[in-house]
Image: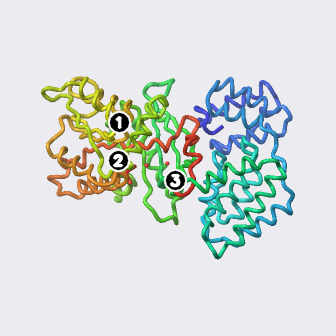
Amino acid sequence: MCAVTGLDAPHERSLLISMLASRLPELGNIRQHGRTRSDMLEIVQACLRDPRGLPELLDTLNVYAPGSPPVRRIRELVATPPVLAVLPEAELRAVRTLLARVSHLDAHGLLYAAAGDLPLPHPPVATLGEAFDHLTRVNARPDGLLPLMVLVEHVVADLQGDEAHRRVTNALREWNDAQAVKLGLAVQLDAVRTETSGDPAAQPAPACLVVQLDRHGMDPNRYLLSHWRQIRPGPWRPQRGEDQVVSLGEVEATVERLVFEAEKDWAGRPGKPVLEFILPMHLLNRPMEWLPLASDSAFAAALCLSYPVVLRSLERMRAPHFHRRWHNRWQQLQDAHETVCHWDTAGRRGHDPVQWNSRLTADERLVSVALNAPPLPGPDGSLASLETALRAGVPVAVWDRRPGASGDFRRRARKLMKGKATELPQRIQRLRNEAATAAAAQRDHHVGRHLAVLFDDPNRIVDWSGSPGEDTARARGGHDDEGET
């Protein structure tokens, strides 16, 4: 409900309550706190007290936001029957005893791997027993397999070759086999066992904050700002926060607040979180990496001094017909020792757009483009070149935000492309830090001050409803939100 566009405003929540009361008058006195989540809890609790409450709430939301993904998800939840216990407590107790003997494993990471698209507990679990107990309270998967059995398989896979825990490994596997026979799920368990034992660990996703801006349908001067947080490195399991409607002038303060909130989640976890901005094409040339933190104090500093910051394309993320080529180029990027770059010729003498586009489309070894000008419309911009690159599946693009690429930009861009692609975000951050710490006379002219970088991983998808992409949901192991990724 918090993700339903508009309900972040108190007067819109009052409208929703008024609409509910027209159907069920006893719901007209719902208490309001002036805070989105608290008000939603009051509305849901009031509806739960009336046998007709949840169906009427769903019908009202369908009128308020017809067909929106959050309302479709609420429909699924309302239609889902209560979870009934499948296994007796004695059987569950036996597994808890075994799991207590392997306290060295990453409980939260294993829960991420086993949970698929299921909601994850907050705060994160600390032990395998807590992870197991969480999964005893959720529904079976579409194939009928219990998620707690999937967790056991992931534990067994992580313990393979650990002689000190061979007895625990064998006992857990025997327990899973016995439950599969009892429940008629032997085939499904074999499939999961093959997957967990045969697949390599997924490429880690860093802890990150993903901020997305999309033009608001009702007001072209305002934007829907959505955000996701990947709390820890591991499988891509970003958690969506509340949407907000903002003007471009309000983005700075909103991002600052979101970063500080994310740092509370990351507290006590060493590492290097990444900030990603998913932007529509017309905003890609805005210098998001230079937004300030602690802007109201003497300690104000740009985001890029503390975090790798990268751009991502909103249009491509929402265009699945381009995703196969995107995945192909990303795999090429991961396998290559150097990032092979296609240099833009737009605006230069002899520019042949058909030849440039054809070569880029035909050669999947070209995994990055360096634009000759900012991606702006018109004869002096390289907007068409960037659009071609995105359609071809190119995951990396760099450009100088100033009109006309300087010789220093070309030199720096070539240097950035040398080395492993996965380290590109860190190299970019070092260049930006170099610009920020340059002498005052050189600071504004340094190429690092004007460098824009699109670094777009197709395995780390967020969609309108905030769910991870289906392909990444199957990934196992530590990566779930993009160095400067």
**Looking at the picture, does residue 17 appear above or below residue 430?**
above
**Looking at the picture, does residue 208 appear above or below residue 250?**
below
Asked whether 54 or 21 is in front, the reply is 54
Q: Residue at position x 30%, y 42% from top?
A: 452
Dot 2 or dot 1, earlier in sequence: 1
Amino acid at the residue labelled 3: Ala
Amino acid at the residue labelled 1: Leu
Q: Which residue is mark 3?
A: 202
Q: Are marks 3 and 1 in contact (CB under 8 Å)?
A: no
Q: Residue at position x 33%, y 29% from top?
A: 388
- Distance between the alpha carbons at the discs numbered 2 and 1: 11 Å
Q: Which residue is mark 1?
A: 284
Q: Which mark is drawn over residue 289?
A: 2
The answer to whether residue 157 is visible is yes
- Distance between the alpha carbons at the discs numbered 3 and 2: 28 Å
Asked whether 368 or 313 is in front, the reply is 368
Would residue 3 be found to the left or right of residue 175 on screen? Answer: left
